[in-house]
Amino acid sequence: MGERKKLTGMEKFAYGIGAVGKDMVYMLSASYVLYYFQDIMGVSAIAMGVILLVARVFDAFNDPIMGVIVAKTKTKWGKFRPWLLIGTLTNAVILIVMFSAPPSLDGKGLVAYAAITYILWGITYTMMDIPYWSMIPAFTDSGKERENLSALARSCAGVGSAIVTIITVMSVAFLGNALLEKKTNPETVSFDSAVNGLSAYVVLTDDAGNPTSTVTEYSADKTALSVNVKGSEKLFEGVEVETGDTVIEGVINVSSSNAKVSYDIEGVTTEEGNVSFVIDNIDGKESVVVIYVNAEDYAKITQGTDIVGTVDMESTLEVERIGFKYFTIIVGVLFVVFTIITCVVIKEKSSVEMKTASVGQMFKALVQNDQAMTIVATIVLVNVAVYITSNLLIYFFKYDLGGTNWQGNYTIFNMFIGGIQIIAMMLFFPLLRKAFTTLRIFYLAVFSAVAGYGILLAMSLLGVESVYIFFIPGFFIMAAVGVLNVIVTVFLANTVDYGEYKNRRRDESVIFSMQTFVVKLASGIAALVASVCLAVFNIQEDSQGAQTAAMMIKKISDLITGAGTTIDDSSVIGLRLVMTITPIVVLAIAVILFRKKYILTDRKLEEITDELKKR
């Protein structure tokens, strides 16, 4: 039988488009499931951290089991494509269900929902991921062709990840706003001083729109404002509070970060006001409204002893919940369509054996190969460092930098760093390889990442707010990540040769199967660290609006003394330190471990290659 003809352009496209869809789904889950359940649905941050860690570790051990199942499959369509299609269909359904949590759920019910759907998502993702990467030998022959196809698929996977990273937040906001009225049937409730003890604060902002310590206070007897809040039932749940003829359930905390605001106060009218409003959860008799204005409007509004006017606030708390649901449906449908293209175009050879490794074989190979152990530990540490920052990045933009356009800034930043990562993999690494050894490139990349984190810390502590200035640390960090993604694959290949040299056994499939395991393990550890950060520094509490009117007044007092961030100072500092210092420490440990244990220099590899040839 003659050698198989080379892959056509259509076959390469079909396989690559499958990787695009696959990693669109993976990135949506990896980057936003914590944010969705913790920040939007209100699940405890610690509970989410434990769920993510347990699910990822379980999923990592599930990989070898799925490998065995695929290897034993025999159908007229081959052994890979049936599982690829079944896994894609079930994973897409579970993904949509996961991001469609019923708003009526809370407490233990919501925790159970998050745990069950996330674990099922991991199982079904493995169901299609294992056959996708394992099927390459089923339609390629030459080593060079396989190597090129693997590189193409990895690049396409990077494109899929970048697409979701770039468009998710803005797409969620667009879909949520477009569908909000149809899906929530919102109602409007009015609050005023007579019934709700409404007091008011007018805060002067600087030229950049940041609050200053210049504040004018109006007690309830001097406040003749009516605050009209429009929102869904989700906004008004909790402890019952009497407000005139209407019974509202619970704390209401509405601001420009989660509502569309307009007002007419003392002749000053705007459709895009910056206002915060809180009514407490004790008896509904104390509430606070804070109006942030520029110098011109500040002079007009504060010229009298009383403050009179109307504030209209349309809550968008449901925007993200609804937006994520329908954005996930779109991504899920694209995922299925892309996989169908792969399955239809790619034709498997009938006689392809698939080597699989059990969990025991994996750890046996590691124990007997100290260099593989070193690289695996290094990969875990590097990925933990990167994933900690990526998990917390959305909170940094939403609650630290803040602003009504935080989604736009977050999208712009992700667009930049996603592009840099792809360029680093495809361009920077080949250029650096011409001038340096892989060991030197590794150290340069880690140094670049540490420098980027240091710059990010300095900029955040100095109060830098321009998203474009954050491109500087973003470049250093993500360029390093892109290069390291390539280098670890090279290092793993080196450990395979070393293992054959030392143990007279080539554990190629076993060693490379560890790559998926360690990435999932690292993402689980990082998710737990990020969740602990959110819980310890009360970022969830602040973001969920659980503060009382008394807490709002305290924040105004803090503002007068110099504080003025979207979340309180301790939360801000904690978030910044965990995002920057923790990755630096983890990367330092990785470098120390690698420098101490890794011995496969270019000269050593030449010796090993010569010895293997002699054998």
Image (cartoon, helix red, strand yellow):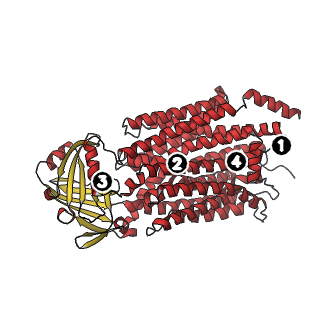
The residue tagged 3 is: 551
Q: x, y percentage for residue 481?
A: 57, 39
Q: Residue at x 65, y 27 (%)?
A: 436
Amino acid under disc 4? Met
Q: Are marks 2 and 1 in contact (CB under 8 Å)?
A: no
**Labels 4, 2: front one:** 2
Q: x, y percentage for residue 580?
A: 48, 39
Amino acid under disc 3? Met
Q: Of helix, strand and loop, which one carries label 2?
A: helix
Q: x, y percentage for residue 603?
A: 75, 26
Q: Could you tell me which quadrant the C terminus lies in?
A: top right
Inter-mark Cα distance, 4 to 2: 22 Å
The residue tagged 4 is: 514
The residue tagged 1 is: 505
Mark 3 crowdedness (10 Å alpha carbons): few <14, some 14-19, many ≥20: some
User: Looking at the image, is 601 positioned above or below residue 98?
Assistant: above
- Which of the marked residues, 1 or 3, is nearer the chain's N terminus? 1
Residue 235 position by quadrant: bottom left
- Which of the marked residues, 2 or 3, is nearer the chain's N terminus? 2
The residue tagged 2 is: 529
